[in-house]
Image (spheres, rainbow, N blue to C red):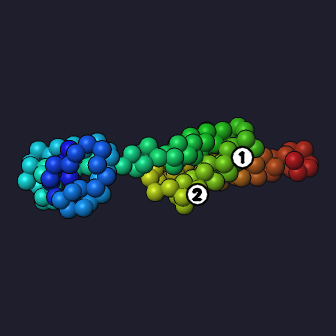
Amino acid sequence: MKCTNCGNEIPEGASFCSACGAKVHNEYVVQDDEPNNQNNNGGYRPNPPMDDMFGAGNGLAIASMVTGICSLVLSCCATTLSFVLALVSVALGIYVLIKHKGSRGMAIAGIACSAVALLASVVISILYGLFALFEYGYWY
């Protein structure tokens, strides 16, 4: 294995490079096509951290987006359920935006769908109440 800092050979299992003293990251490395790259590290670069792609926030962001879409779909016929799902989606989306750096797009999509669903649920509930008021003489 080669040091990602100086390019010297490092024995397997070493924690630090014996030539430059850089800490060795025990992760898989990929060799660049060009051995003389700008970092001058012998053509090796570390793989991207897995937390960026598959971190804990990714599942919560997906849950936010899915519940947001479900609340949007249900806003026309099940306004109470839609309202609850929208609140859950907004809470999950805000949590992901505050605590996790990855998956921001799905969290924002969940919040946006939930906002539209909340607005639709409120408008439909008001229209239903007005219809009941004028049709039956009482606010439902």
Towards the viewer: 32 or 80: 32
Does label 1 or label 2 sit earlier along the sequence?
1
Secondary structure of the residue carrying tag 1 is: helix
Are there few (<14), some (14-19), or many (20+) residues within 10 Å of tag 2?
some
Q: Residue at x 20, y 48 (%)?
A: 10
Name the foreground residue: 32 vs 81: 32
Question: Where residue 119 sits: x, y (%)?
Answer: 65, 54
Q: Nearer the viewer, mark 1 or mark 2?
A: 2
- Label ID, residue 94: 2
Q: Is residue 18 visible?
A: yes
State the residue in front, 39 or 110: 39
Q: Amino acid at mark 1?
A: Val
Looking at this view, is 25 or 94 the one in front?
25
- Of the residues shown, which amino acid type is indicated by label 2? Ile
Pointer 1 residue: 84
Q: Is residue 2 left or right of residue 132?
A: left
Q: Can you see residue 69?
A: no
Residue 59 point in image, percent of width and height: 53, 42
Is residue 62 found left or right of 31 in the rendered image?
right
Residue located 54% across and 54% down the image: 96
* Label 2 element class: helix
Number of residue marks: 2
Q: Looking at the image, which residue is at 15% across and 54% down?
A: 7
- In this picture, residue 119 sits left or right of residue 106: right
Question: Where residue 12 sits in the image (x, y, percent)?
Answer: 26, 42
Query: Badges 1 and 2: C-beta atoms under 8 Å apart?
Result: no
Q: Position of residue 97 (x, y in %)?
A: 52, 58
Most distant residue in the right direction: 137
Q: Is residue 110 left or right of residue 7?
A: right
Residue 20's place in the image compared with 29, above or below, is below
- Going 42% across and 48% down the picture, which residue do you hit? 51
